[in-house]
Image: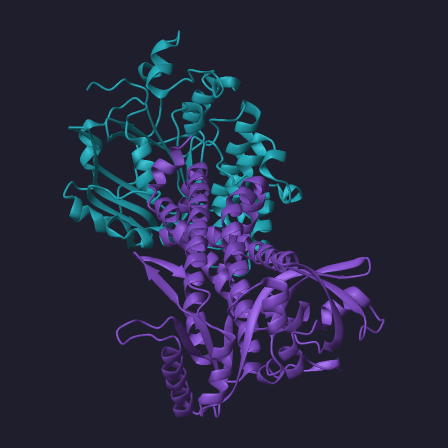
Amino acid sequence: MFYFRVFLMSLRSLLMHPLRTALATLGVIIGVAAVVAAMSILEGMKASFTDSFSTIGTNTLFVTPAQQRRSGRSVANFDTLKLDDCEALVRECPKLKNATPQIMSGGMVKFLSKNTQASVLGTDEQYSEVNSYKPEQGRFVDKTDVLSESSVVVLGHKVKEDLFGGRPAIGESVKVSGLLGVRTFKVVGVMEKKGNLGFTDVDNQVIVPITTAMNKLYGMKSVSFIIAQAVTPEQADIDGAKEQIKRLLRKRHKLRPGVSDDFSVQAQEEILAQFSTFQQIIAVVLGSISIISLLVGGIGIMNIMLVAVTERTREIGVRMAMGAKRTDVLLQFVIEASVVSFLGGAMGVLAGWGMGTMIERLTRIFETLTTASSVTMALGMATVTGLMSGIYPAFKASRLDPIEALRYE
Amino acid sequence: MKTVIQIRRLTKHYHMGDTVVQALDGVDLDIAEGEYVAITGASGSGKSTMMHLLGCLDRPTSGTYELDGDLVSSMSDAQLAVIRNRKIGFVFQTFNLIQRTSAVENVAVPLFYGRQTRVQEPSLLALRRVGLEQRAWHKPNELSGGERQRVAIARAIVNNPRLLLADEPTGNLDSKNGRAIMEVFNELNRAGVTIALVTHEMAVAAQARRIIRMVDGKIIEDAVVTDAVRRELLGGGHYHGDAATSSHPPAIDSAAPTSATPPVAAKSIPMARKATAPPPAENGEDGSGGEHPTSGSRHRGFVETPKP
């Protein structure tokens, strides 16, 4: 009851100066909003990433061109993986079930007067199986398409919706722009609705045969990466497959012993682990920014509490004369500071949630996810900030000499 | 009558830079239940220090102070806060109400710190005692000066304190409101409340039933105010209405010598020397057979200027 009254009392004194209180909370609002927005972006990224990787399967291996170091600097080397390498992998590695090459780029897809920006994926017939991603209508790119470099295209769900709406798309011609110019493709299939696969929103993607992409759209001699699947998800098979891939590619690339690989092979788990490191880095960066803004917010609150203590010196003297213990005075100001920052925190949560949603709408890269735990954490941090910044002014108030305080003008 | 206050050889020293100020210099004082005491003196006489010590806002340098049987002179800050809360009511010159809350909430402050659950009823009751119940929900800035001081008095008595301490309670009021406030004190005293009033105004002090005069941290006069004295002091024109608001209110030391009539002391005011000796129990301790140790320095007349 006593504490509740102290709480009401502090609420009241805060409402005496609404503008001042609002300005004091601003720092905390921004800090908490930053925490909540950062957390929801991180959580959203994690969720979509884990989600899309779970559909890929734990037996998946990613073969990419290696980052090479030249005079200390990291230089990307894009042209080490050839289409032949991929065929050789399937043929000569017994631990591999399949392997599919990919080229990724972006381009404009046009149908009559309508056009849309989409990612363009060049791949082969195994992509669909490797990613368990199936066509909804028509067919996927097949082996003949790849061998004959035919100009066929399979549209992602969203691309189809954007260009054709409810009308059938199979058999229609669309134009796809690449580095070598604009080419006309015949729509042979429409993919099911899938969402994200890895970092790509595959619904907003068109798929063409890899040979067509390399030779007719982009003029590339190598592939971006190869996705392979080990025969089983057993660790031994994954390690075996990795070993076989390395040995084969080193032989094919004629690398002498001592020369480092010009490619890298990573299992799905390693990618996830890498992502989690990446995520931790982002978390540390965003976390530091948030902590700094909360610190600034805390300074704002401390400042306003110091003003309040000076302003109410006489009142403190009166309260002490009426029997307020030093701890009562301490409590009054600590609670007041905590209430300010909690209110700021609550507003910050709303603002942060709004910011997250806005970022999601604007960027459309990933969904954001505001979890109960991040809200609780943000509110907790705000309240702790209030407590920390309220303690010194409150202590100052509680140490006042009642006689001096009563004389204060 | 039960003793409420028993003070023995109380001293209080302040350090101001390198010099030590002796604000109180071995004071002995007893106040019994139901007494109405005015403590007077010029500024620097130690009456404010006396007030702070009586009000348990401060601790003495040496000596003892028993309030209602508790040896408060050696208590901790927290214990003193409890004593102030339960046993002392303060009335200040500047009212010292909390501006943002209503009268009744101001009155409830001591109950609040006393961790009491029922606050509104006793607060309204206290306001009724000072005749301000109908203004209970007004904020201080909606009340007149006199009304504010009544609220302050209600706040001081809401806990039924053993001692009501008032510091120049009429100092910020006009004569009419000042008189009304003094009437409230008289009324409370008649109802049994023990009052100690600190003032430099003789006319205000004359309302009390016992006057203690302080000079240089010592009690130099301790006398009962008879009706005759009161008439003399009130009728003598010293309590002129706007005394309180004038820049130089007639102070005890200056009023009489400057008056046209011969000093009151010369007329030998029939002011009875305070006859009540300390209760027998203390006589032994005192070792002075009922006389206060300060009695040697006592002056007969009330308004005589003491020689340093």
Residue placed furthest toward the front: A148
Residue placed furthest toward the right: A167
How many numbered badges does the structure rendering display?
0
Q: Quadrant of the C terminus of chain A?
A: top left
Residue placed furthest toward the top: B260
Q: Residue at x 37, y 54 (%)?
A: A327
Tell me, by letter, which chain the rendering colours cyan.
B
Taking the image as drawn, is residue A155 in sight?
no
Q: Residue at x 84, y 71 (%)?
A: A166
In the image: residue A55, left or right of residue B82: right
Taking the image as drawn, is residue A281 in sight?
yes
Note whether B199 is above or below B157 in the view shown.
above
Q: Position of residue B178 (x, y in %)?
A: 52, 28
Q: Position of residue A349 (x, y in %)?
A: 57, 58
In the image: residue A170, left or right of residue A348: right
Q: Position of residue A260 (x, y in %)?
A: 31, 71
Out of A143 and A276, give the one closest to the viewer.
Answer: A143
Out of A358 and B174, give the one closest to the viewer.
Answer: A358
**Quarter-of-image position of residue B32:** top left
Q: Position of residue B134 (x, y in %)?
A: 67, 43
Note whether A245 is above or below B224 in the view shown.
below
Note whether B233 is above or below A128 in the view shown.
above
Q: Residue at x 53, y 19 (%)?
A: B241
Out of A1 and B120, give the one closest to the viewer.
Answer: A1
Chain A: colour as depicted: purple
The chosen color scheme is by chain
Out of B199 and A382, give the one closest to the viewer.
Answer: A382
